[in-house]
Image (spheres, grey):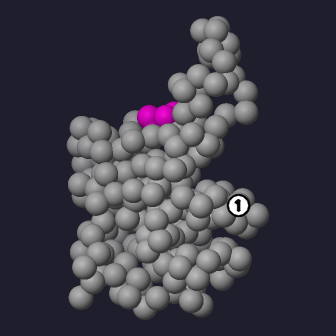
């Protein structure tokens, strides 16, 4: 029996699925770090307020807007609106080092192999060895995403496909990579059955 515990999850990508997955973990009492990219330019409101691209509010706009939109969506992704307090937002430039505290890192970025590989390269620099790292991909072969990553990364890497909306569709697919440790697969399957 695994002694792993999931106290904190990092979700990389705050689109519909990423925000939904973050809310789903917040529902079960898990602390979540939700990260996304930094905007390339100011919007009109930010310009009117005199902000610069270096302003933290601007740098976290994409992730904060995505989470706000998720919370307003119908059906509601949270059991209770107060559970949003379990989600901390940030961006992939200023806050990526915070993934070191996560027990599970879930990548939910756009379905492009080049982007996913770049994200995994950056995550590997900051993740704690032994941390589970998964992709929510629905179409890219798992082994392509882990090519060039360390042995530890590949042992702890697999696909975990949530279905939309995660709170309401009780489907959780676990897809092994060629080097995924069977203990990781067993843990994720058991965790999914018990909590997700």
Identify the residue position indicated by label 1 in the image.
Answer: 118
Q: Which residue appears at 44% of the width and 74% of the height?
A: 130
| Residue at image coords 31%, 41% | 84
Viewport quadrant of the N terminus: bottom left
Residue 111 location (% of width, % of height)? 68, 63
On-image quarter of the C terminus: bottom left
Residue 34 visible in image: yes
Q: Secondary structure at mark 1?
A: helix
State the image coordinates of residue 7 (x, y, percent, origin top left): 28, 60
Between 83 and 71, the one lying in front of the other is 83
Q: Is residue 118 left or right of residue 159?
A: right
Query: Residue 118 magenta-drawn?
Result: no
Q: Is residue 18 left or right of residue 196?
A: right
Seen from the viewer's position, the closer of residues 29 and 121 is 121
Report whether residue 163 is seen: no
The stretch of residues the image draws in magenta is 64-69
């Amino acid at each position: 029996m695994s002694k792993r515990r999931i106290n904190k999850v990092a979700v990389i990508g705050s689109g519909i699925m990423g925000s939904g997955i973050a809310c789903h973990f917040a529902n079960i009492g898990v602390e979540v770090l939700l990260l996304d990219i930094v905007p390339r330019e100011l919007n009109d409101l930010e310009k009117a307020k005199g902000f610069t691209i270096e302003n933290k509010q601007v740098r976290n706009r994409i992730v904060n807007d995505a989470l706000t939109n998720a919370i307003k969506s119908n059906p509601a992704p949270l059991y209770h609106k107060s559970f949003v307090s379990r989600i901390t937002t940030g961006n992939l430039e200023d806050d990526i080092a915070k993934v070191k505290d996560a027990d599970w890192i879930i990548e939910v970025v756009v379905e492009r192999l080049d982007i996913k590989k770049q994200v995994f390269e950056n995550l590997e620099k900051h993740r704690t060895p032994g941390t589970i790292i998964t992709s929510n991909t629905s179409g890219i072969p798992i082994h392509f995403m882990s090519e060039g990553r360390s042995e530890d990364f590949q042992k702890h890497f697999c696909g975990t496909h949530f279905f939309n909306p995660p709170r309401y569709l009780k489907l959780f697919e676990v897809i092994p990579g060629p080097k995924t440790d069977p203990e990781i697969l067993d843990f994720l399957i058991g965790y999914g059955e018990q909590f997700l």
